Image: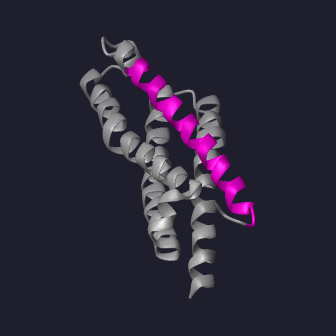
Amino acid sequence: MKNISSALASLLTTAWIGSLWAVGYLAVPVLFYAQPDRQLAGMLAGQMFTLVGYLGMVCGLYLLVQRISMSGRASFRQALFWIVAVMLLITMLLQFGIQPVMTGLKLHALPLDVMHSTFADQFKMLHGVSSIFYLIQSLLGMFLVIRIAKPDNR
């Protein structure tokens, strides 16, 4: 059972970190480059980030529970546990804090694009904060992948 749990943890880590990198640094930039309608590109990007967020919450919760079930209270002294916990916290902050506010600003701006409305400055600020959190989460994901590749997994 330990092998199945560890294999699933590896797969979920791959899915979570891979989706962060693939969507945030490949798909969305290509979308904004290729799609002339920036409002449509933004809507599609938002949907992709929402799906990545839900995937991250599922993966992060499993990884925390799996780590606790494998190591018990000792997991709270392990770097892997805290990397995943911070990544999960960032995911939830983005998903339930920043993204809904940005969506609300877009809706309030209609029929205008939010970037051509009175909400543009607030949207840009939230977008910047969101981008910084996403970068931090992506870097933590890099450390998570590197740490998992180490034999001691701590």
Specify how the rendered protein is coloured.
Answer: one colour
- At 59% from the left and 40% from the top, the residue drawn is 24
Q: Tell me, yes or no, if residue 128 can be seen here.
A: yes
Side (left or right) of 86 relative to 20: left
* Along the line of sight, the residue nearer the viewer: 47 or 22: 22
> Which residue occupies the foreground of this view, 138 or 78?
78
When the figure is inspected, residue 109 is found, relative to residue 154, above or below; the finding is above
Q: Is 10 positioned to the left or the right of 71 in the image?
A: right
Q: Give the range drawn in magenta.
A: 123-151
Numbered circles on residues, count: 0
Q: Confirm whether residue 62 shows in the render.
A: no
Q: Residue at x 52, y 72 (%)?
A: 71
Please provide percent x and percent y for residue 9: 58, 70
In the rendered image, residue 139, in percent from the top left (x then y), is placed at: 63, 41
> In the image, is residue 42 above or below residue 121?
below
Magenta: main secondary structure: helix
Quadrant in the rendering for residue 136: top right
Residue drawn where x is 75% and y is 67% of the image? 151
Residue at image position (42%, 55%) is 54
Q: Position of residue 115 (x, y in %)?
A: 41, 17
Can you give x and y, in whole percent of width and height, for residue 126 in the image?
Answer: 40, 24
Looking at the image, the residue that sits furthest to the bottom is 1
Residue 148 in the magenta stretch? The answer is yes
**Residue 125 lies in the magenta stretch:** yes
Could you tell me which quadrant the C terminus lies in? bottom right
Quadrant in the picture for the N terminus:
bottom right
